[in-house]
Image: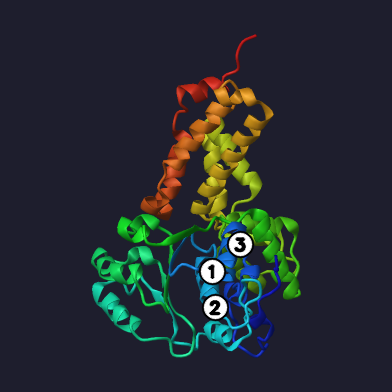
């Protein structure tokens, strides 16, 4: 797989305004896509054999490459110098699509163009052949937000478009598509990226920018991104601006308002032991240092999950709740996942964390924490 830096970024001048990392490092060919090997190979084969569907849906979490894949497909079906199913990114068609200078490839934000009037306008354009390229391609992002009436108006065009028209949809919520539309689309599911995949690309970006980072710092950023490369690149962009070289794990925690590992583990211990006073002291200290309670909630849940997994790996019998700490950990996790940070707000979230400390463990959890007599 070619993981080289995308071509246009090499040409960026130091005198140009700053451009976000996720834009500078957006994949321009199939070979530059990180992860998604099965999807990439299927699309390559479709291009190679000229069997690309006229209506494709890319589904997956945000920041995982759906729109990038759609743009690459648009290039591939118009490229005049294909290389084993991959667009060359150098011919006039590829350059025009990459730079957004052609009207034959239109990217539409369906969130703000979701009504029947916008769809009627789109349908009127379909009859006109492409001006310069081989195919006209319509990329509709956040397509699940299109209204039902608009979908009904678009259905016939998706089913039987002119030979020179392609529709590429990207969405985080396929449930928002009417079944009649879904049945006419070729669907590709885009998975979350793994921590090593994200970490590897971040390391390549740092090398290209002449910067360094501690391994723990990149691993933390990759975990926080939750499988989304764009989020990881946005965090790295902030770090390159604010942090010294090398970028350290404490610098990442400071930037994002994360609690230190010792504070997180201490709060977990306070939950398990019913030591509300100790837990409140930790909350007070973190608040004084400006730490984000939302981030703390996520960190504590992750720490509890980590302990659960570790206990189960040490003792398979613990899966049956015979281990001494598994029920208590599960009970603490249930108390925390019941908290809705969006409804609570920042002040209310602090109170919810305090109430979790005061809550009595379930009978199973309490029994698990009580030593048995020999």
Q: At 70% across and 68% down in the image, what residue appears?
A: 3
Disc 3 + disc 1, Cβ < 8 Å: no
Q: Is residue 229 visible?
A: no
Identify the residue at horizontal 34%, vertical 59% (top origin): 177
Quadrant of the frame with the N terminus: bottom right
Q: Residue at x 53, y 53 (%)?
A: 295
Which element carries disc 3, helix, strand or loop?
A: helix
Say which residue label 3 marks.
41
Which badge, 2 or 1, is on the more N-terminal residue?
Answer: 1
Which residue is labeled 1 in the image?
69
| Residue 13, position as x, y percentages in the image | 67, 89
Sequence-wise, which precedes: disc 3 or disc 1?
A: 3
Front tag of 2 and 1: 2
Report x, y in % for residue 176: 34, 58
Q: Indicate how the structure is coloured in the image.
A: rainbow
Contact between labelled residues 2 and 3, with CB atoms less than 8 Å apart: no
Q: Residue furthest top?
A: 374
**Label 1 residue SS:** helix
Real-space Cα distance between discs 3 and 2?
Answer: 16 Å
Q: Quadrant of residue 346?
A: bottom left
Quadrant of image for the C terminus? top right
Q: Which residue is the site of mark 2? A: 75
Q: Nearer the viewer, mark 3 or mark 1?
A: 3
The image position of residue 351, as x and y in percent, is 42, 45
Mark 1 Cα shell of 10 Å, populated few (<14), some (14-19), many (≥20): many
Does residue 171 appear anywhere in the picture? yes
The answer to which of marks 3 and 2 sits earlier in the sequence is: 3
């Amino acid at each position: 797989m070619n993981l080289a830096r995308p071509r246009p970024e090499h040409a960026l001048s130091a005198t140009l305004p700053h451009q976000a990392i996720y834009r500078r490092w957006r994949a321009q060919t199939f070979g530059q896509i990180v992860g998604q090997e099965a999807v990439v190979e299927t699309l390559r084969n479709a291009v190679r054999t000229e069997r690309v569907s006229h209506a494709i849906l890319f589904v997956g979490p945000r920041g995982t490459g759906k729109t990038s894949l759609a743009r690459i497909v648009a290039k591939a079906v118009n490229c005049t110098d294909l290389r084993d199913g991959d667009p060359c990114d150098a011919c006039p068609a590829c350059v025009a699509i990459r730079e957004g200078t052609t009207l034959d490839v239109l990217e539409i934000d369906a969130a703000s163009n979701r009504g029947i009037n916008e769809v009627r306008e789109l349908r009127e354009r379909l009859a006109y052949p492409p001006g310069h390229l081989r195919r006209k391609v319509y990329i509709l992002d956040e397509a699940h937000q299109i209204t039902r009436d608009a979908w009904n108006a678009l259905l016939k065009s998706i089913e039987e478009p002119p030979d020179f028209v392609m529709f590429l949809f990207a969405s985080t919520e396929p449930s928002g598509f009417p079944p009649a539309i879904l049945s006419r689309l070729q669907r590709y599911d885009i998975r979350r990226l793994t921590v090593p995949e994200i970490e590897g690309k971040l390391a390549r970006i740092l090398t290209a920018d002449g910067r360094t980072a501690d391994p723990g710092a990149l691993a933390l950023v990759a975990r926080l991104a939750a499988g989304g490369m764009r989020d990881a690149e946005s965090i790295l962009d902030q770090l390159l601006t604010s942090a010294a070289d090398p970028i350290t794990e404490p610098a990442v925690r400071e930037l994002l308002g994360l609690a230190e590992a010792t504070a997180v583990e201490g709060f977990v211990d306070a939950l398990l032991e019913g030591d509300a006073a100790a837990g409140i002291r930790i909350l007070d200290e973190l608040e004084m240092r400006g730490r984000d309670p939302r981030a703390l909630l996520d960190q504590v849940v992750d720490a509890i999950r980590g302990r659960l997994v570790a206990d189960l790996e040490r003792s398979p019998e613990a899966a049956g709740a015979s281990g001494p700490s598994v029920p208590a950990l599960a009970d603490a996790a249930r108390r925390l996942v019941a908290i809705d940070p969006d409804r609570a707000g920042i002040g209310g979230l602090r109170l919810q964390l305090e109430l979790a400390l005061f809550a009595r463990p379930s009978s199973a959890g309490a029994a698990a924490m009580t030593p048995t007599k020999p």
